Image: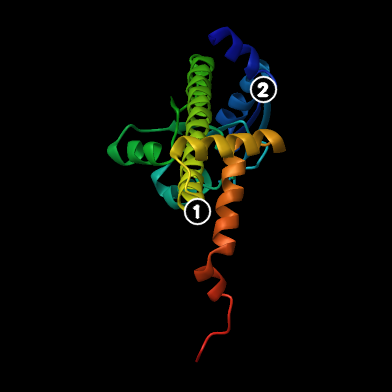
Amino acid sequence: MAMQILRDLKGLNVLVVHPADAEGRSLTEHLRRIGCRVEAQWPVPDRIPSHCDIVMLVVEQESRDLVLRFARSYDGVPPTLIAMVDYENPSTLQMVLEIGALAVVERPVRPFGLLTNLTIARSLWLERAEHGKRLAKVERKLAGVQKIQKAKSILMERQGLSEEEAYQTIRKQAMSKRVPMDEMALAIINAHDLLNPQNLLNFGPKRG
């Protein structure tokens, strides 16, 4: 896996948020030698560009509010975030935790160890992404089970079916219409809600 991550680093979009000094130029040059596509910005921008895969961010107590706002400004899946710090004091470490950094690089940044930190951070990011996909899949499955259970209850109540008969009814309807069972269950729930007399009353004129 490590070798694959190393290969994948080539071509990734890296945003370096670091003062435009000799250290910053050296960092961007080394990242380009690794094979990354590098963009440098300073001061701290308002938002993380949507195309960024990795963000290397200087974390300073003096710019705490800017750093926190920037680190939380992503849309969708957050990028791999690496913090660059001067000191390991409690305040700085708190900021590192708050921005969700997956690795920490000591300043002044040196080429030695940079590739290791990139690899570790990217590996953790990939693990989180995979975990997120699995969790989303489980949540979708659970939501589907809940819909089917509710649809079964409606059929059992309205048509006097047993639980197994209600399940088989949903299953057969789903197969005949070539849709997933949870989609068929949702259609039954929506139809029941629409035809529920209590709901129909809600559409009538309201008395003042």
One can see residue 91 in this view: yes
Q: Please identify the quadrant where the N terminus is shown.
A: top right
Instruction: Name, please, the residue furthest toward the front.
Output: 160
- 74 vs 101, left or right, is right
Identified by mark 2, the residue type is Cys
Q: Is label 1 in a helix, a strand or a loop?
A: helix
Q: Residue furthest bottom?
A: 208
Residue 181, numbered label: none
Q: How many marks?
A: 2
Q: Work out whether residue 192 or residue 55 is closer to the camera in this orientation and state it.
A: 192
Q: Nearer the viewer, residue 76 or 30?
A: 76
Which residue was labeled with disc 1?
158
Can you tell which quarter of the image residue 50 is in? top right
Q: Residue 12, how many percent across, how many down?
A: 66, 25
Residue where numbered disc 2 is placed: 36
Q: Residue at x 58, y 39 (%)?
A: 170
Dot 1 and dot 2 residues touching (CB under 8 Å): no
Mark 2 secondary-structure assignment: loop
Q: Is residue 32 left or right of residue 201?
A: right
